[in-house]
Image (cartoon, grey):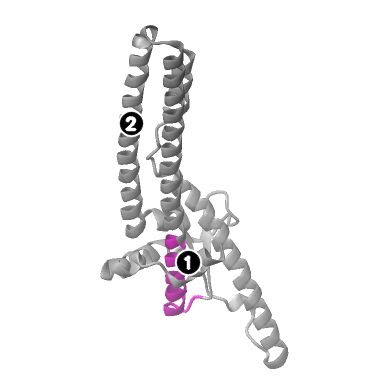
Amino acid sequence: MILAKRILYLYLRPINPNFIQVRKTFTRFAVLALVAVVVYSCGKKSDSTSANASSTGGVAASDLKIAYVHTDSVINKYDFFKKKSEEITEKGKKLDLDLQARAKGFEQEVAMFQQTGGNLTQNQIRAKQDELMQKEQNLIGYRDNLMRELSTDESTLLNDVYLQVQEYMKEYAKENGIDLILSHTRGGAIWYATDAIDVTKSVTEGLNKKYNANPAAAETKPAALDSLVKKK
């Protein structure tokens, strides 16, 4: 039956619970955002240095203390991100099982209609077809809602992690007297940097130490994110 084949084709698309792609997406997102922060910071530092140099002799740009981190490593090893991404993955699997159960039930109903349709009148056949079409739309809508829900969860996590990392970077830089922390990623703006200024390990350890000391704080939406959401 054409109706049955079309219906099953439309709704039998499982939700992908794999969160690896989200991590890749976040890496690209974080790199762009951090580069923007770096460029802005450089500009501010340059303006300030130029002004001071003009009036008091100032500090040369060469006196800046610079470090860098491998952004993807920091993110993927951040305990909060690992925990929440695993939760979203598990949620996706459960939603997928629920969707497949509903799909199987619908498939059985379609099969039954195929088997018994010959005993129905034309009016009954049309009524059943309309009923199946409506159930098809309901299933598609349900599937799309689940996918939107997961997408929202992922987007929220990415924003939360970015803000937490950004906040900690500022703390780390201040504690260690660093003027500029760059983001080193494959295909990014930095082609080479000496390992002597690689602070990836210490930043990751510090970030996790801060999180594990008070996990509840990370679960609370940062004020900056609240402001971002309200603007949308």
Q: Amino acid at mark 2?
A: Arg
Q: Is residue 176 magenta?
A: yes
Residue 101 percent coordinates (x, y): 30, 30
- State which quarter of the image contains the N terminus: top left
Name the side, left or right, on which 105 lies relative to 63: left
**Up-down relation of residue 68 to residue 95 (above or below):** below
Q: Residue at x 46, y 66 (%)?
A: 163
Q: Residue at x 38, y 40 (%)?
A: 18
- Residue furthest right in the image: 54
Q: Which residues are magenta?
A: 160-178
Name the side, left or right, on which 153 lies relative to 192: left
Between residues 177 and 131, which one lies in front from this camera angle? 131
Q: Is residue 152 magenta?
A: no
Mark 2: give few (<14), some (14-19) or many (20+) Cα within 10 Å.
Answer: some
Residue 227 percent coordinates (x, y): 51, 70
Q: Say whether disc 1 or disc 2 marks the residue closer to the N-terminus.
A: 2
For label 1, the residue is 225
